[in-house]
Amino acid sequence: MDYNTLRQRWDALMAPANIYDVDHTLEPLDDAVELARRAGMAIPAGEPPWTGDEVSMRLEHDAHTLTVYRPSRAVQCVDNGRWQVDDGTSDMRISDPEAFDAAVREASRLGLLEQDDFTPFRVTRLRASSCIRGHSPREPRVVDVGVVLKRQLDGLGFEGQGGNVVMYFGPDGSLTGFERVARRVGKVRAAVSGWRSLDDVLTETEDHLRMRRDSDFTVAQARSGYLELGRLQEQAVIQPVYVLALRLGGRNRGREEPERRIEHVVPAALNNIGPLVPGAEPDIPQTPRYSAA
C-alpha cells in the first residue's frame, strides 16, 4: 500500500496498552505432574523420573511424553503412539466450529487456559494419501486436526511464536497432544506512554533491512499486538509491537525474480524496552526520512 493509505490506517493500530513483567516465580501451570495425569499419563505415586538437559525437562510414561521448556516454561504433551499417526483408513470429518469447541473444552478441562483470555485462531489439518506407481494418488484423508487458540490482552492479540495454546485431535476425536506457549503475565511495569509514529517505524525498518520502501520493498499490511517469543527463547517483558508484512523487491525486482514476503517486527511503545529478542543488537536510531506534515 502507498504511504498515504498506510498513514490513514496507522492511528487505528493504537490502543491503551501496558508493558508487563513476565512472572518467572511459578512452575508451568503450578503442577506439571498433575497436568500429566489429567492428560492421561498413568504416573505412579511418588517422585516421577524426570530427565532432561539445559533446554528442557521430560517426563515419559508408556507412549506419552510431557516436556517443559526451561527458557519459556512452555509445556508440551504428546501421545507418541497416536499423535499425527495415520492408521491407513480414517478420514476426519470435523468442521472448524466443532474443532474450536472441542479445543476449548479440552483445554479448559486440563487447566491450560488458566485466567487468560484465549480466542479461536486457526484450524490445521494433516492430510495423508497413497498411490500405486503409475496411477493417480488417492483422495487425501485428514488424519489429524490441530487447533490454535490465541491469547488476548487489553483487547490486543498476540504476535510471534508464543501467546497460544495448540490442541491436537486424532481420527476418533480424542486428544492426542497439546502445547501451551503462553508465559504468565505479571505486574504492569509501565503504561505505554505513547505509540511510535509511522515515519519513525518506516525509517527504522529501512535502516534495519538496508533497503528503501517502494524501490526495494512495499508494505502489504500493518498490525499491532503484544509480542511473545517461542518456547526456546527467554523473555522478560510482554510489550506491544508493530508487525509489517513486507513484499521484497519493489520496483527493483526483476521480471523473472520471485516475490519474497517477510514480516518485520518493531517495538510500538515510545517507552519500549529493547531489544525485543534477547542478545540482539539494537538498531542505531536514524533521522526520519518521512514527514507526516
Image (cartoon, rainbow, N blue to C red):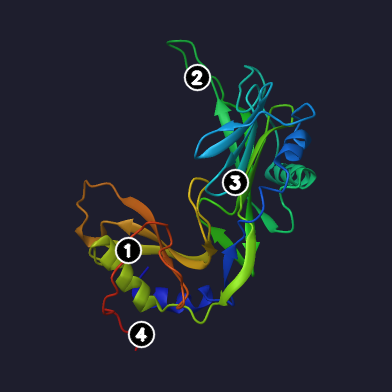
**Which SS class for mark 3?**
strand
The crowding category of the residue bearing disc 1, from other C-alpha atoms within 10 Å (few below 14, some 14 to 19, many at least 20), is: many
Report the quarter where the C terminus lies: bottom left
The residue beneath circle 2 is: 137
* Mark nearer the N terminus (3 vs 4): 3
Determine the residue located farthest toward the top in the rendered image. Answer: 133
* Mark nearer the N terminus (1 vs 4): 1
Q: Position of residue 276 (x, y in %)?
A: 43, 62
The crowding category of the residue bearing disc 2, from other C-alpha atoms within 10 Å (few below 14, some 14 to 19, many at least 20), is: few
Q: Determine the CA span between mark 3 and mark 1.
A: 35 Å
Is 56 situated above or below 282?
Answer: above
Q: Is residue 30 visible?
A: yes
Q: Determine the CA span between mark 2 and mark 4.
A: 56 Å
The residue beneath circle 1 is: 218
Q: Position of residue 200 (x, y in %)?
A: 35, 77
Q: Is residue 48 left or right of residue 228?
A: right
Q: Is residue 213 visible?
A: no
Amino acid at pointer 4: Ala
What numbered label is drawn on residue 292? 4
Is 277 situated above or below 35?
Answer: below
The residue beneath circle 3 is: 74
Q: Are marks 2 and 4 in contact (CB under 8 Å)?
A: no
Q: Determine the CA span between mark 1 and mark 2.
A: 40 Å
Q: Determine the CA span between mark 1 and mark 4.
A: 18 Å
Q: Position of residue 42 (x, y in %)?
A: 77, 26
From the image, state whether disc 1 or disc 2 is nearer to you: 1
Image quadrant of residue 57?
Answer: top right
**Residue drawn at the location 62% of the way across and 42% of the way down:** 75
